[in-house]
Image (cartoon, grey):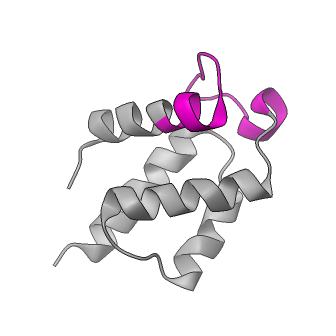
């Protein structure tokens, strides 16, 4: 399980490398500030699944739709990691 700093490092790297964000801030609105759309969101969820090493449940994917910032992504992943901890 990754801590928040490790998660942040990986998510920012994904956003910069795969989505061509420039210097994304943790509180930037991904859609308004970076043109992130629903297709990007689906792609990002697939990358998060790969990062976590398991498939997200449909309800978990639906919860992702409220994500607006990188901080939201980190909160989201932390909540999923906590719920999958055995």
Image vertical order of residue 28 relative to residue 76, above or below: above
| Residue bounds of the magenta highlight | 14-34
Q: Name the residue at the bottom extreme.
A: 58
Looking at the image, residue 45 sits to the left or right of residue 85; the answer is right
Q: Quadrant of residue 38?
A: bottom right
Q: Position of residue 26 (x, y in %)?
A: 55, 28
Q: Nearer the viewer, residue 77 or 36?
A: 36
Say which residue appears at 16% left-offset and 79% top-offset.
86
Q: Nearer the viewer, residue 45 or 71?
A: 45
Q: Position of residue 9 (x, y in %)?
A: 37, 31
Image vertical order of residue 30 relative to residue 33, above or below: below
Residue 18 magenta: yes
Q: Position of residue 34 (x, y in %)?
A: 76, 30
Q: Position of residue 81 (x, y in %)?
A: 31, 64
Q: Quadrant of residue 65?
A: bottom right
Say which residue appears at 28% left-offset and 75% top-offset.
84
Q: Name the residue at the top extreme.
A: 23
């Amino acid at each position: 399980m990754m801590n928040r700093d490790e998660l942040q490092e990986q998510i920012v790297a994904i956003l910069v490398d795969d989505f061509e964000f420039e210097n994304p801030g943790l509180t930037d609105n991904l859609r308004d500030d970076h043109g992130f759309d629903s297709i990007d969101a689906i792609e990002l969820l697939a990358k998060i699944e790969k990062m976590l090493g398991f498939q997200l449940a449909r309800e978990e994917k639906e919860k992702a739709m409220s994500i607006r910032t990188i901080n939201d992504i980190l909160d989201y992943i932390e909540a999923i990691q906590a719920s999958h901890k055995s």
